[in-house]
């Protein structure tokens, strides 16, 4: 039980990678607050977490709305007592080539993926600084490092998340708060299910390990980064991609 009685917020935690991280943390002994826009899925995942014998609360929060974020962090603090861990996982894609990408497509992806990460980090920073302890993990992407045709908005947002991770790490290190990023490659979720079959086949050929990753692969990396085993690790970007970006 490496996270025994710790309290974690997971954004975008109703499904996909966020759900898997929340389940892994609960199995490791943590209590969980989930932030997500999808109320029905949110309540389903909260029920799963409670089924593991942990305290779990679900909050309908759009991470782009600072008032909602601040209010939900306050409620989670009141209900669960502390916030030890924040996983900034909520994210979307709206792909298209640069010459066809409209302003709204650019703004929406940058606002959710990058501003949302900033707003949630800012909201937990004060309570974490007060308690002189905290772990923040931002879910970036390998395309924030290597780029990807058709994902100008997404790759820019994830490169931004990596810069934000390093600044957060530098600003908060003195208060015993670490901040790291995970850069997943292609992981089997509804986000990648949407890829055309031909594109998936090409991807598989480019991945040395020959398969897409599982949400569990990202969850295990997150578990390491928030555990005592990673006490001295901060400002790091942990790539979880089957060798794609070597
Ligand atoms: P997913 O299955 O689409 O799950 C994302 C969750 O975030 C959904 O429940 C979604 O709600 C929620 N969400 C979207 N916008 C939100 C907002 N404004 N506020 C709060 N919650 C919001 O995605 P995933 O594949 O698990 O990806 C999770 C993270 O990993 C993302 O940051 C993604 O960029 C990153 N990532 C994924 C892959 C991959 O291959 N899957 C690779 C690299 C990085 P809805 O139900 O409304 O969509």
Image: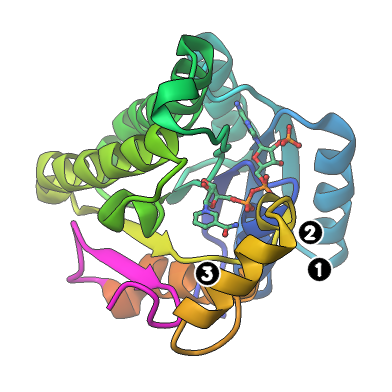
Between marks 3 and 2 in the image, the one whose residue lies nearer the viewer? 3
Label 3 beta carbon less than 8 Å to ligand 1: yes
In the image, is residue 99 above or below residue 240?
above
Element at label 3: helix
In the foreground, 111 or 78: 111
Where does label 3 land, which residue?
218
Residue 74 visible, this angle: yes
Q: In what quadrant of the picture does the N terminus appear?
A: bottom right
Between marks 1 and 3 in the image, the one whose residue lies nearer the viewer? 3
Report the side of 206 relative to 62 (left or right): left
Name the residue rendered at 85%, 42% in the picture.
41
Label 2 beta carbon less than 8 Å to ligand 1: no
Name the residue rendered at 38%, 35% in the picture.
152
Where does residue 204 sit, x and y in percent of width and height? 57, 78
Report the side of 187 relative to 230 (left or right): right
N-terminal-most mark, 1 or 3: 1
Ligand 1 falls in which quarter?
top right
In the foreground, 44 or 161: 161
Identify the disc placed on residue 49: 2
In the image, is residue 23 above or below residue 143?
below
Where does label 1 land, which residue?
52
Name the residue rendered at 28%, 57% in the picture.
146
Q: In what quadrant of the picture does the C terminus appear?
A: bottom left
Whole-Å distance between the Cαs marked 1 and 2? 5 Å
Q: Residue furthest bottom?
A: 209
Labelled pair 1, 2 in contact (Cβ < 8 Å): yes
Q: Please state the extent of the stretch shown in magenta in the rendering.
A: 231-246
Labelled pair 1, 3 in contact (Cβ < 8 Å): no
In the image, is residue 26 above or below residue 118?
below
Task: Report crowding for label 2: few under 14, some 14 to 19, many 20 or more residues within 10 A (C-alpha).
Answer: many
């Amino acid at each position: 039980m490496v996270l025994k009685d710790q309290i974690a917020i997971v954004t975008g935690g109703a499904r996909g990678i966020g759900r898997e991280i929340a389940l892994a943390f609960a199995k490791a002994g943590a209590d969980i607050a989930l932030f997500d826009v999808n109320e029905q899925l949110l309540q389903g995942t909260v029920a799963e977490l409670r089924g593991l014998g942990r305290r779990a609360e679900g909050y309908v929060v759009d991470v782009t709305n600072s008032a909602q974020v601040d209010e939900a962090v306050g409620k989670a603090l009141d209900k669960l007592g502390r916030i030890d861990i924040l996983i900034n996982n909520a994210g979307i894609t709206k792909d298209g080539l640069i010459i066809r990408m409209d302003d709204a497509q650019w703004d929406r992806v940058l606002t959710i993926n990058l501003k949302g990460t900033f707003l949630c980090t800012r909201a937990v920073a004060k309570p974490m600084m007060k308690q002189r302890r905290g772990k923040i993990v931002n879910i970036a992407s390998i395309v924030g490092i290597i780029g990807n045709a058709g994902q100008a908005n997404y790759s820019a947002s994830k490169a931004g998340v990596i810069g934000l991770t390093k600044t957060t790490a530098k600003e908060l290190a003195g208060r015993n708060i670490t901040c790291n990023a995970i850069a997943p490659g292609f992981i089997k979720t509804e986000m990648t299910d949407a890829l055309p079959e031909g594109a998936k086949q090409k991807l598989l050929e480019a991945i040395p390990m020959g398969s897409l990753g599982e949400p569990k692969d990202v969850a295990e990396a997150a578990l390491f980064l928030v555990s005592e085993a990673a006490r001295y690790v901060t400002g790091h970007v942990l790539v979880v991609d089957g060798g794609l970006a070597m």
